[in-house]
Image: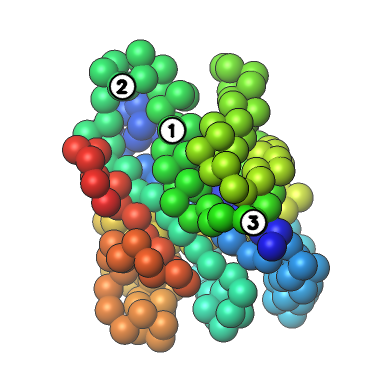
Amino acid sequence: MDFDIYCDESSLEALTKTEEHLYSSIGGIWLPRDCREEFKKGIYNIKAQHKIFGELKWKKISPSYFELYKDLIDFFFRTDYIRFRIILIESSKVNHIKFNNTDAELGFYKFYYQLLHHWILDFNTYNIFVDLKVNSHPHRLAELRKVLDLSNLTSDISQVQGLHSEESVGIQLADVLTGLVTSKFNNEVKRDSVKAKLIHYIENEYLGKEISPTPKWSEKFNIFKINLQGGW
């Protein structure tokens, strides 16, 4: 079976400036490739209903957009074929000197590997799309694809491609859910803000509890708080 994965990150600066945030994160949307057009149509319909034609982003959320983002959350949770996974990285425990030869960019892509590897299953093909960024090492994405391919010999990592987020509603949905979860863990939303209302909406309407780390086998809304001492 063929799958598409759309990824984005949040609070990335904390990987090098630990005082910026408690956590950095990378999140991804998983869906079967043959559902791609249906998925895109669903999100474009939501945007059209609210007369919004620009990019969906967690940072852009304001009170006037509450219903738009609430409808986006409903679409995600009510569409069976879409899954979300996020890796949370505790910034104070990241040691690029010891583990990455002082290369923070290398460390970032190691965390990308951890996000993706554990959800790559045998005998499938994966097309991975990440938010485009300028890397100091020009071959980071090719290396990530190669390492994933070599560590999943019975699956095919067809591509790891950078896309501008405004060109991909998949990356935009990943941005919103990744930003939401990360803001919750970083305690960075005001109690009565629209972002807090969206967090509470997910907790009350869909989870029945506070957003928190999930078991490894949790499929719909998976939160992986990595233990940098080893283990899950």
Counting the numbered discs, the total is 3
What's the residue at 35%, 26% (across, down)? 16
Distance between the Cα atoms at labels 1 and 2? 10 Å
Q: Earlier in the sequence, mark 3 or mark 2?
A: 2
Disc 3 vs disc 2: Cβ atoms closer than 8 Å?
no
Q: Secondary structure at mark 1?
A: helix
Disc 3 vs disc 1: Cβ atoms closer than 8 Å?
no
- Mark 3 or mark 1: which is in front? 3
What's the residue at 60%, 31% (across, down)? 146
- The reply to whether residue 72 is in sight is no
Instruction: Using a 10 Å C-alpha cutoff, classify the residue at mark 2 as few (fewer than 14 neighbours), some (14 to 19) or many (20 or more).
Output: few
| Amino acid type, callout 2 | Phe
| Amino acid type, callout 1 | Lys
Q: Position of residue 221 (x, y in %)?
A: 43, 68
| Amino acid type, callout 3 | Asn
Camera-nearest residue between 152 and 208: 152
- Position of residue 123 relative to residue 147, above or below, is below
- The label shown at residue 99 is 2
Distance between the Cα atoms at labels 3 and 2? 31 Å
Q: Which residue is mark 1?
A: 110
Image colouring: rainbow
Q: Earlier in the sequence, mark 3 or mark 1?
A: 1
Q: Position of residue 22 (x, y in %)?
A: 26, 44
In this picture, residue 155 sits left or right of residue 220? right
Instruction: Using a 10 Å C-alpha cutoff, classify the residue at mark 3 as few (fewer than 14 neighbours), some (14 to 19) or many (20 or more).
Output: some
Q: Which residue is mark 3?
A: 124
Quadrant of residue 131 within the rendered picture: top right
- The label shown at residue 119 is none
Residue at the top extreme of this rendering: 101
- Mark 3 or mark 2: which is in front? 3
Q: Earlier in the sequence, mark 1 or mark 2?
A: 2
What's the residue at 29%, 47% (across, down)? 226
